[in-house]
Each structure stands twice: as structure tokens, then as C-alpha cells.
Image (cartoon, rainbow, N blue to C red):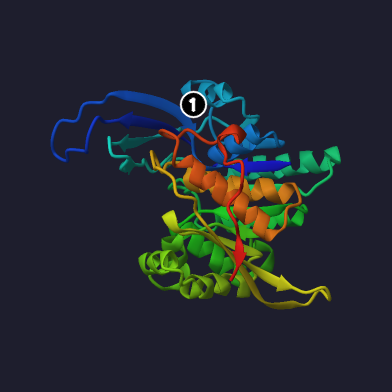
């Protein structure tokens, strides 16, 4: 079972332009769509498409446009309260360049109602006695009224109930996750999924330089940066490197159970024609967690993650990959 939590859900409104975006000018739309969004909702959608058991927990009213969009996708969902849902605008020009304009979210929410709902959901799953492993995916930005350490607290709560936890966030929420993990080992997630720039935010370095070096075959800087998170108690770090692919760093646990140096794998992204990058990171995370609940080893999880992420960029707007969209042969993940 995979439970996704989206503190800051959105209606993702995509507007396609016939040519390049004319900043300061008049841009005419050739087509547009509204889709239910937020990183956790996107992850849940990909997992649902893949046929794995999933439940999305979302702070939103059970009625209205957003709820209708979620139900249209068939994703099992638990709506919590009547929080406001933001609208995020994506402009995709004729050359595939994407411009995102994101709203901050519901300023009146403080996270307490969602915390209670998540705890109850975890308890319900545990009471059902369904065999694991069970994962909780905490994903996306936090609304303005949430405390920065909300993800760290929820990670500790999920660990106390025996769940594995993946976190995908940035900025103050990611910094708080790293900071609290130093003081409370239970707050360190089993997986964190930063891109190179988010990784640099919390451990230092230059995200652009990491991506350029990775594209040239030099992974030393990103391995070193990701390894600092493992040293701080994180189970694994899945670092997306743009068109270059992705890197997975984990603890290197030998058969005697002792923690050794880190182990790292790199998987290059297949050459594809990008249509829209929206949802690619969420699809990458979904691919990894799908592999995890199916018992795949680390390199196979990474390959499945890259296959999902690279497929997502070939789809329009926030369209998310289904199994039929994936390549018949997964990309190769190699140890570095």
C-alpha cells in the first residue's frame, strides 16, 4: 500500500501556445486543460495507473471542481476538511518550453487537521493487517500557514507506525527536514528526492554544475553531496539530474548488517523529445516507490524511476505516464 499526502493541492491549468511566449505581449491559447495536481496527487495517479494499491490524502473539500477532477482520474482519495485549492498555471509554447506560475496555497491552514487525518489513515491501514511494505509519500510545497518542520514531524509519526517514508520537497521544508533529522533519527526519511538545485540548497554546492558534470560523465560532486544526507541518517537519496538522468545513493549494507560506505547508482535518461516537463519529477518518484513495494533492488528501482520520469516529459501538459507509455526495455542503471 502506498499513501500519498499532498499538503498543498492544486488545479493544474495548462495553456498551450502556438509559438514562443511573448513576454509583455498578447499570447493566444490554442488549447487548455484543467487537471487535479499537487505532487502527492500526481504520484498517486501514476501508482494507480500502474495497478498498485494507493490512497491519496488531500486537504480539500469533497465537492467542487478539484474533487471532480480527482475522481475523474479514478484515484482512491480521502478528502480532509474544506481547505482552499490553489490554481497553478503552466504555459507551454510551441517549442516545448514550459513556464510555471504557482500560487502559494491556503494561508488559513496550519497543518493540524491534516496531521490528524494522516495519523488516522495510517492506523486504519495497520488495523487492516495488509502485508507490507507500506510507504507514505509526503510531497510538494507547504501552504503558508504550515510549520516548516511539518514533513519532519509526519516522517517521525509514520516511522512510529511502521511505515517507510519518501519525501519530495524544497526550500524551508527541506532544510527543516535535514535539521530535525540531526536531532531525531525517526525524522530522517527512507528516501528523499531532490533535484540537483534542491540538493545544493541543503548541503552546498552548485546544482547547475552538478548537472553539467553528470552530463559529461563526472558524478563525483553529486555523489559526495548526496552522501552527506546518508551520513545524517537518510535511507536513500534519489537525485534527478535533468536530461542527464538520475543518481541513487544509499547506505552500503553488507551481509553482516553493518553500515559501510555509501553505494551509488547512476541511470542515464533515454533520448526523448520533450513536450512538457510538468510532472516528470513526480513520475520519477512514483516509479521508485512502485519498485520498492514490488520488492525491486536499488538499481531496478532507479531504472523504473528514470523510465517513468523520461516518459512523462514526452506527454502534454500534466499528463502522467501509464504502463503502456513506458519503454519495453528499461534503461540500464550502473554502479558508480
Crowd around label 1: few <14 · some 14–19 · many ≥20 (10 Å): many
Q: Residue at x 46, y 45 (%)?
A: 143
Where does the image place residue 335, in percent across and percent down from the top left? 62, 68
Where does the image place residue 277, in percent across and percent down from the top left? 41, 44
Q: Which residue is mark 1?
A: 66
Q: Is residue 110 left or right of residue 215?
A: right
Q: How many marks?
A: 1
Q: Residue at x 65, y 49 (%)?
A: 289
For the residue pair 296 and 328, the one nearer the viewer reads as 328
Quadrant in the rendering for residue 6: top right
Whether residue 138 is situated above or below residue 261 in the rendered picture: above
For the C terminus, give its image quadrant: bottom right
Q: Is residue 144 visible?
A: yes
For the residue pair 142 and 216, the one nearer the viewer reads as 216
For the residue pair 123 and 69, the one nearer the viewer reads as 69
Q: Is residue 110 visible?
A: no
Amino acid at each position: 500500500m502506498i499513501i500519498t499526502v499532498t499538503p498543498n493541492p492544486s488545479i493544474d491549468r495548462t495553456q498551450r501556445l502556438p509559438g514562443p511566449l511573448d513576454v509583455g505581449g498578447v499570447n493566444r491559447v490554442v488549447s487548455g486543460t484543467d487537471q487535479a495536481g499537487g505532487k502527492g496527487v500526481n504520484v498517486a495517479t501514476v501508482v494507480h495507473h500502474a495497478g498498485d494499491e494507493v490512497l491519496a490524502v488531500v486537504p480539500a473539500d469533497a465537492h467542487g471542481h478539484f474533487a471532480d477532477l480527482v475522481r475523474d482520474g479514478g484515484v482512491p482519495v480521502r478528502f480532509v476538511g474544506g481547505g482552499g485549492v490553489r490554481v497553478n498555471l503552466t504555459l507551454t509554447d510551441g517549442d516545448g518550453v514550459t513556464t510555471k506560475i504557482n500560487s502559494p496555497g491556503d494561508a488559513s491552514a496550519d497543518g493540524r487537521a491534516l496531521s490528524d487525518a494522516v495519523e488516522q489513515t495510517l492506523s486504519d491501514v495497520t488495523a487492516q493487517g495488509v502485508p507490507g511494505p507500506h510507504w507514505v509519500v509526503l510531497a510538494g510545497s507547504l501552504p503558508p500557514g504550515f510549520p516548516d518542520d511539518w514533513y519532519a514531524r509526519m516522517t517521525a509519526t509514520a516511522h512510529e507506525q511502521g511505515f517507510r517514508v519518501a519525501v519530495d520537497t524544497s526550500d524551508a521544508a527541506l532544510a527543516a527536514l535535514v535539521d530535525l533529522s540531526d536531532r531525531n533519527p525517526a525524522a530522517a526519511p527512507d528516501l528523499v528526492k531532490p533535484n540537483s538545485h534542491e540538493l545544493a540548497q541543503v548541503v552546498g554546492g552548485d546544482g547547475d554544475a552538478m548537472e553539467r558534470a553528470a552530463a559529461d560523465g563526472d558524478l563525483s560532486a553529486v555523489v559526495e553531496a548526496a552522501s552527506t544526507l546518508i551520513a545524517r541518517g537518510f535511507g536513500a537519496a534519489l537525485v534527478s539530474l535533468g536530461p542527464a538522468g538520475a543518481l541513487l545513493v544509499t547506505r552500503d549494507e553488507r551481509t553482516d548488517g553493518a553500515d559501510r560506505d555509501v553505494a551509488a547508482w547512476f541511470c542515464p535518461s533515454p533520448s526523448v523529445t520533450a513536450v512538457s516537463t510538468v510532472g516528470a519529477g513526480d513520475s520519477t518518484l512514483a516509479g521508485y516507490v512502485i519498485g520498492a513495494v514490488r520488492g525491486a533492488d536499488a538499481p531496478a528501482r532507479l531504472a523504473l524511476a528514470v523510465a517513468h520520469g523520461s516518459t512523462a516529459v514526452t506527454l502534454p501538459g500534466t499528463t502522467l505516464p501509464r504502463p503502456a507509455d513506458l519503454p519495453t526495455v528499461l534503461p540500464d542503471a550502473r554502479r558508480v
